[in-house]
Image (cartoon, rainbow, N blue to C red):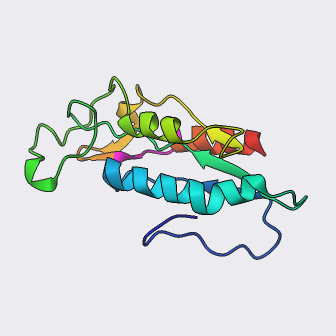
Amino acid sequence: IGFGTKTALRPSGPMTHLVYNVGAHFTLMESRNMLNSFVSNIAMPLMRSKSEHRPTIVYVITPTAHFNTPDGQYIRKDRMDDERSKCVERVSYNPRVELEKRILKAGVNVDVLLDYDDLELGALHVQRGDCMHYCMPGAADLVAARLLESF
């Protein structure tokens, strides 16, 4: 599931797992608001449910962007020059991960917090100027493998 224009399709059968991610296309404040809404309106009511049919709630940590900026994040379009638009191989931290880990706790408001370390995977991005999408195989394959392990 997701908020905004990118929402998954309704399940056609019993839902055994609910996989969620805010994504990188929002500001940190927007992401925080969406995470808090997810926790209070979806995750916590499900976590409190005693139903044997309750889905396992899996949150996938947002992948790291590797823009040539202090924290690797995209800055407003009018501030992104040629140098900042280049992908760097490594960033020191992902502020989205820090935000998500402050709000989401495995066993408390999600069942699984699917984390992976992609701070040093900037060389796997698609091309110069697209530091948010990875080539395949790449980080997305790592997420898929860890997701399957959580089932």
Q: Is residue 35 above or below residue 102?
A: below
Residue 141 picture location, percent across and down: 58, 42
Give the residue at the far right of this rendering.
Answer: 52
Tell me what residue is drawn at x 57 percent, y 35 percent.
Answer: 115
Q: Is residue 14 visible?
A: yes
| Residue 54 is inside the magenta segment | no
Left of 67 or right of it: where is 101?
right
Q: Is residue 137 visible?
A: no
Q: Nearer the viewer, residue 7 or 130?
A: 7
Q: Nearer the viewer, residue 83 or 24?
A: 24
Tell me what residue is drawn at x 40 percent, y 25 percent.
Answer: 120
Residue 2 picture location, percent across and down: 52, 64
Q: Quadrant of the N terminus?
A: bottom right
Q: Nearer the viewer, residue 3 or 67?
A: 3
Q: Which residues are magenta?
A: 132-139
Residue 123 picture location, percent across and down: 36, 32
Residue 110 picture location, percent across and down: 67, 46
Left of 101 or right of it: where is 11?
right
Q: Is residue 102 above or below residue 77?
A: above
Residue 150 image-quadrant placement: top right
Left of 61 or right of it: where is 75?
left
Residue 30 image-quadrant placement: bottom left
Number of callouts: 0
Tell me what residue is drawn at x 59 percent, y 63 percent.
Answer: 41
Left of 74 or right of it: where is 141?
right
Tell me what residue is drawn at x 41 percent, y 28 percent.
Answer: 119
